[in-house]
Image: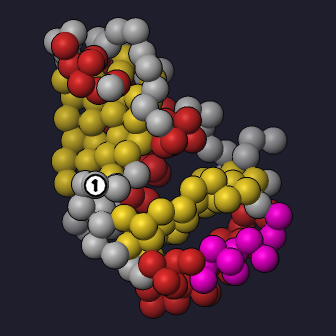
Amino acid sequence: MKPAIAFLELSSISKGIETVDAMMKMAEVDLLQTQAIPRGKFTILIGGEQAEVEQSLQAGIQTADKTLIDFFLIPNVHQQVLPALQSRIQVKEIEAVGVIETKDVAASIFAADAAVKKAAVTLIEVFPGKGAGGKGFVTFTGEVGAVRSAVNAGVETIKKEGMLIGSVVIPYAHKSLLKALTQ
């Protein structure tokens, strides 16, 4: 069985820390990432078996209460998502480049998973919002048609009004862009 992940974004750092504690006490999950991001927000990413992740997520939602900005559960997260969230993935060459920019981090992770499940693309980065005003973005590369399909799939997952800031497909990207995307 593939692992599940859950993500919460809160408007309070202190409530975020309390929420992490409640989630970890509720179920046997891995704490994959926490961070304070600009505008006083706090993000939590957990992973593990789906039933455990669901229990932990429910505890997080209850504890976060009115500070909860967004959350999601991805039952069978694509294997490229977590490595691209933790650091930029080094690729040797690029053909087309796709970018999806969102108002918050949660939407960008969800879009990344949908994009790589839809088309044969390689995630370069799922940017977790730190240093970008709390925004999230996803970059990936592949053949032009695949990148177009991946961008469309990622954008379609962003349901909340105003969460999508922009998306772009750069066909036949200049080779110098590779350096900018992977440094």
**Closer to us: 142 or 59:** 59
Q: Is residue 33 above or below residue 9?
A: above
The prevailing secondary structure element of the residues shown in magenta is: helix
Rendered residue at 34%/56% (across/down): 130
Q: Is residue 18 above or below residue 75?
A: below
Q: Quadrant of residue 170?
A: top left
Q: Residues within 10 Å of mark 1 (few under 14, many from 20)?
A: few
Spot occupied by residue 7 in the image (x, y as percentages of width and height): 55, 62
State yes or no: residue 22 in magenta: yes
Q: Is residue 61 above or below residue 129?
A: below
Q: Quadrant of residue 18?
A: bottom right
Spot occupied by residue 84 in the image (x, y as percentages of width and height): 49, 36
Q: How is the image coloured?
A: secondary structure
Rendered residue at 63%/53% (across/down): 32
Numbered circles on residues, count = 1
Going by the image, does 74 lie left or right of 126?
right
Rendered residue at 37%/45% (across/down): 127
State yes or no: residue 2 in magenta: no
